[in-house]
Image (cartoon, grey):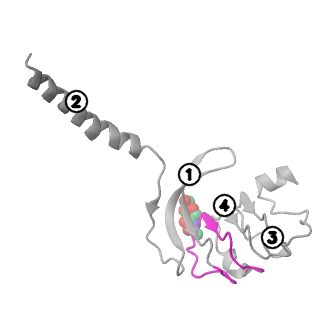
Amino acid sequence: MKPTLVLLQLQCLLCVFVGVCVPSITGSLPHALPWHVSCPVRCVCQIKPWFSPDSVYHEAPTVDCNDLLLTKLPLPIPPNTHTLRLQSNLLSELDTAVLHGLTNLTDLDLSQNRFSHVRTITQSSSLPSLLSLHLEENHLSHLPRLPSPHCQLCRNSF
Ligand SMILES: *[C@@H]1O[C@H](CO)[C@@H](O)[C@H](O)[C@H]1NC(C)=O
């Protein structure tokens, strides 16, 4: 076999590898997909990978409003929101009427805000799907004992 032919064959193999293997490797990694909804101004709305507390993979409609110096909930929050990220803002209270419509909200991140009580979140049963509530780095002095009856994770940890 001539050396050029061998080189050509190697190049072909490389092409096949790059053309077939690389897209399927990167394609199998979880990644964000576009989510065409009316998104609150300055927030990012995407379908993103989400793992439940028992490690089940979901493609979760996600509203990301982290780091926006927000003092109130951004509107409109799409009704089918699964994950709502409000980390690193200036929130001290939530409009429960807005949260009330979010029947599929599973993960709510309120960490690094100015909440001093969580009564408004936990008192109502308006978040029947909530599994994960992030409240670290707020101004809370205590947590109420009665979270949502549907909240499996809360029930286990309280
Ligand atoms: C919640 O999710 C279910 C199942 O995916 C869907 O049928 C329903 O329309 C969603 N609710 C809202 C308010 O979008």
Q: Main secondary structure of the magenta part?
A: loop
Quadrant assignment for the C terminus: bottom right
Q: Residue furthest top?
A: 1
Q: Can you identify the residue that label 1 sits on?
A: 58
Q: Nearer the viewer, mark 1 or mark 2?
A: 2
Q: Can you identify the residue that label 2 sits on?
A: 13
Vertical order, 19 against 110 (above or below): above
What residue type is disc 2 on?
Answer: Leu
What residue type is disc 3 on?
Answer: Asn
Q: Can you identify the residue that label 3 sits on?
A: 138
Residue 86 on the magenta span? yes
Q: Nearer the viewer, mark 3 or mark 1?
A: 3
Q: Secondary structure at mark 4?
A: loop
Check contact, mark 3 vs mark 2: CB within 8 A. no
Q: Earlier in the sequence, mark 3 or mark 1?
A: 1
Residue 50 on the magenta span? no
Q: Secondary structure at mark 2?
A: helix
Q: Earlier in the sequence, mark 1 or mark 2?
A: 2
